[in-house]
Image (tube, rainbow, N blue to C red):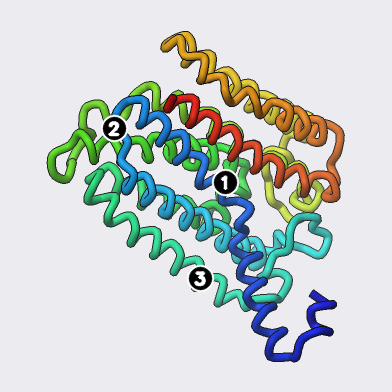
Amino acid sequence: MGALAQSRDMTDTADVSRREAWLIAARPHTLPVAAAPILVAAGLAVRDGVFAPLPAFAAFVGAALIQIGTNFANDYYDAVQGADTEEREGFTRVTAGGLIEPGEVKRAMYLTFAAAILVGTYLVWVGGVPILVVGLVSVASGIAYTGGPYPLGYHGLGDVFVFIFFGVVAVTGAYYVQAAATLAAGIPVGIPEGSVTLASVVASLPIAAIATNVLVVNNVRDREEDAKTGKRTLAVRFGYTFSRIEFAAMLVLAYAVPVWFFVRTGEVAVFLPYLSLPLAARVTKTVFTRTDGDALNPALTRTGQLLALYALLFGVGLGI
């Protein structure tokens, strides 16, 4: 950005810097966490004959907005609560770094969540009361992750939050809105028969597991600073060894699920996610041997790539 400042006039620089700052705050590299559940749910819906493209797309947009709103919330609340310091080895935080005023980031958080709720009105029309409840709880949890009187991420509950909301709820919810659009007559009050299946819950587990591993890598990298600032993640509470075991256990769960589907269906295509094993092994090696940001920042990006690749392969394998 320094070189950019030398090559442009002050007005141009301010404009570009501001756009870049908002892009940093939104953290687009985390969007695989929002896209992955939709890919798997769509593949499963195709297999079951309930695929509905518009509800699937709306579910992705809503999930992406909740993801971005949560990113804004993390940026804002971590800064105002003193969790982001100069020693932090992670990606740039715009609030703590002074790139954007705290009040602006907070407003952006609320506007993004409001946009997610607006998209959710269509999904409520399709999925009824169950989606209304899930949507409101998801938004509230996105704020509560680092904000509110009991921030989940500060008390070792971040992993559980990600596993449930960005895995189980996201996949089963995306499958549900497609199935409800296909099977239900009118706006559902309860859960229509066949709209939440055992297969959709099991299919959510790999996404839940690898999405959780994105957080595990982040927490391993930030363990020392988090311990100083009072952020009691599982890495802080139980140490590096525990986090590495958790990381490995999540991968074992992810790659065990295709076996379950194969036993039930006999379809070899469900093993397509195994093509992502070399990337998983590469990231695992880094997580097991390094704790510094120079290694774990790229590992964090690669874990997001692993999530996207696994989801794409699994979705295709289920849909074939």
- Sequence-first disc among 1 and 2: 1
Please state which of the two labelled residues, at mark 1 or mark 2, is closer to the viewer: 2
Figure quadrant of the N terminus: bottom right
Q: Is 2 placed above or below 208 here?
A: below
Asked if one can make out residue 273 in the rendered structure from this viewpoint, the answer is yes
Cα separation between marks 3 and 2: 36 Å
| 3 vs 1, front mark | 1
**Residue that badge 3 annotates:** 108
| Residue shown at the point (54%, 58%) measured from the top left | 147
Residue 103 appears left or right of 135: right
Q: Residues within 10 Å of mark 2 (few under 14, many from 20)?
A: many
- Residue indicated by mark 1: 32
Left or right, residue 232 beside residue 109? right
The answer to which of marks 3 and 1 sits earlier in the sequence is 1
Cα–Cα span, label 3 and label 1: 21 Å
Disc 1 and disc 2: Cα gap in Å?
Answer: 24 Å
Res. 139 image quadrant: bottom left
Residue 235 location (% of width, % of height): 72, 39
> What's the mark number on residue 253?
none
Q: Nearer the viewer, residue 274 or 177?
A: 274
Left or right of residue 45: residue 316:
right
Q: Residue 177: image x %, image y %?
A: 30, 41
| Between 89 and 87, the one nearer to me in the picture | 89
Residue beneath disc 2: 50
Which numbered disc, 3 or 2, marks the residue that appears first in the sequence?
2
Query: Crowding at label 3, few (<14), some or many (≥20) Cα neighbours within 10 Å?
Result: many
Residue at screen point 32% across, 25% down = 48
